[in-house]
Amino acid sequence: MAYWLFKSEPGTWSWDDQVKEGDKGAGWDGVRNHQASNNMKAMKIGDLGFFYHSVNEKRIVGIVEVCAEYHPDDTDASGRFGMVDVKAVRPFTRPVTLAEIKAEERLSEFGLVRQSRLSVVPVSADQWELICRMGETTP
């Protein structure tokens, strides 16, 4: 199993929106960066991801699971980009802010810190466990 982080502007697609989709999940569409797209191509069903509210909130608020592997993104008229589908697994007991992540030395190599503009980044197993502990959430 691999771990990921998915960034979303809460005004566009929030944790509550994700939860409303239930077990069928929803497509993680609109990604137009090749590196983020390649990260999604590497995803497998059952991989887990952090759901991160960007912009004003800047915090991890929940955990999602990949429920459909990379497939065409209907919102991309060029046909060059795809998406995965994800479903909500559980909210974080205590959201973990970007400031907390940046303050934690053991997360200095975390993609959210190193490549802050990338919308989909890999998360190592050690980073996953640490952030879940920080958020008082079962990994």
Image (cartoon, grey):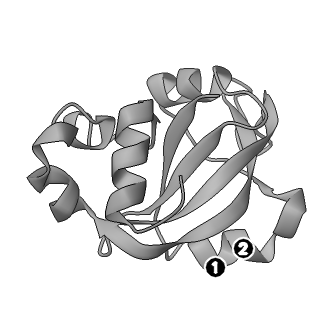
In the image, residue 40 above or below residue 107: above
Quadrant housing the N terminus: top right
Of residues 137 and 57, the one drawn nearer to the viewer in this rendering: 137
Which percent across, then down, holds residue 50? Answer: 51, 52
Binning the other alpha carbons within 10 Å of mark 2 as few (below 14), some (14 to 19) or many (20 upward) gives some
Tags 1 and 2 touching, CB below 8 Å: yes
Q: Of helix, strand and loop, which one carries label 2?
A: helix
Binning the other alpha carbons within 10 Å of mark 1 as few (below 14), some (14 to 19) or many (20 upward) gives few
Which percent across, then down, holds residue 61? Answer: 47, 69
The reply to whether residue 60 is visible in this rendering is: yes
Residue identified by numbered label 1: 16
Residue at screen point 56% across, 46% down = 49
Of the residues shown, which amino acid type is indicated by label 2?
Val
Residue at screen point 84% across, 69% down = 22
On residue 19, which mark appears? 2
Of the residues shown, which amino acid type is indicated by label 1?
Asp
Q: Is residue 56 left or right of residue 95?
A: left
> Label 1 vs label 2: CA separation?
5 Å
Residue 121 position by quadrant? top left
Which percent across, then down, holds residue 110? Answer: 27, 36
Residue at screen point 24% across, 60% down = 98
Which percent across, then down, holds residue 44? Answer: 73, 27
Residue 58 position by quadrant? bottom left
Q: Is residue 88 left or right of residue 134?
A: right
Q: Is residue 135 left or right of residue 22?
A: left
